[in-house]
Image (cartoon, grey):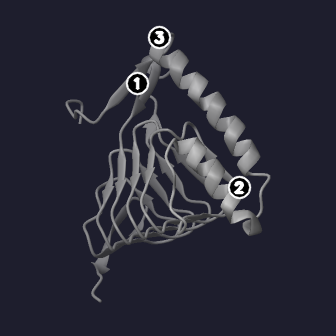
Amino acid sequence: MANDDRIKTIPRGTPESAAMLANVKRALSITAALNRLTFNEADEVRVLFSELIGKPVDEGFLLIPPFYTTGGVDIRVGRNVFINQNCTFYDLGGLDIADDVMIGPNVSLMTSGHPIEPARRRDGVVARPIVIGKNVWIAAGATVIGGVTVGENSVIAAGSVVTRDVPANTLVAGNPASVVRSIAD
């Protein structure tokens, strides 16, 4: 994984680190406003979420606040995406969500972390992208870790921790998540 060109490293005390912190502050301001909205204010939620990610979302996009993120600008959202309440997206590594994805409550999509070695742990941030394919359902309380691709039509069972790629058309469950069965129409 060390040679993976999808890894982004931001060392502490650098201009990149300062830019990341500025973006975190921007995101916290926008999400604070977004989190004052209710389910009945879906149009306003879409406006603020579009501002957060820097791109308009379609009319089929629905997010139920509260919602938390560390940046927003590295989130890409397809059409007809549903995000339930209390989700957390750490998007520094890049977070691609395809069309028709459903994300349950309390889901965490975590693209960033820190070096594992104790002596380097505070040296900076390490991030890897998450790619979620079309028509995926991520059930309540699941966590997806950076570097993972979730294949189209797949389901991640409630409470699962996904640390490896999920093949298309499968149900995965557990910690760490593993394939339970194939999903057929």
Percent x, y for residue 47?
A: 63, 52
Q: Amino acid at mark 2?
A: Pro
Marked residue nearer the N-terminal end (2 or 1): 2
Q: Dot 3 lies on which element?
A: loop
> Which tag, 3 or 1, sits closer to the chain's start?
3
- Quarter of the image holding residue 155? bottom left
Can you give x and y, in whole percent of width and height, for residue 14 in the image? 47, 10
Q: Which residue is mark 3?
A: 14
Above or below: residue 84 compared with residue 145: below
**Label 3 vs label 2: CA separation?**
32 Å
Q: Secondary structure at mark 2?
A: loop
State the residue in front, 39 or 144: 39
- The residue singled out by tag 1 in the image is 117
Q: Nearer the viewer, mark 2 or mark 1?
A: 2
Q: Secondary structure at mark 1?
A: loop
Residue at screen point 59% across, 43% down: 51
The residue where tag 2 is placed is: 66
Label 3 CA crowd tier, 10 Å (few <14, some 14–19, many 20+):
few
The amino acid type of the residue labelled 1 equals Glu
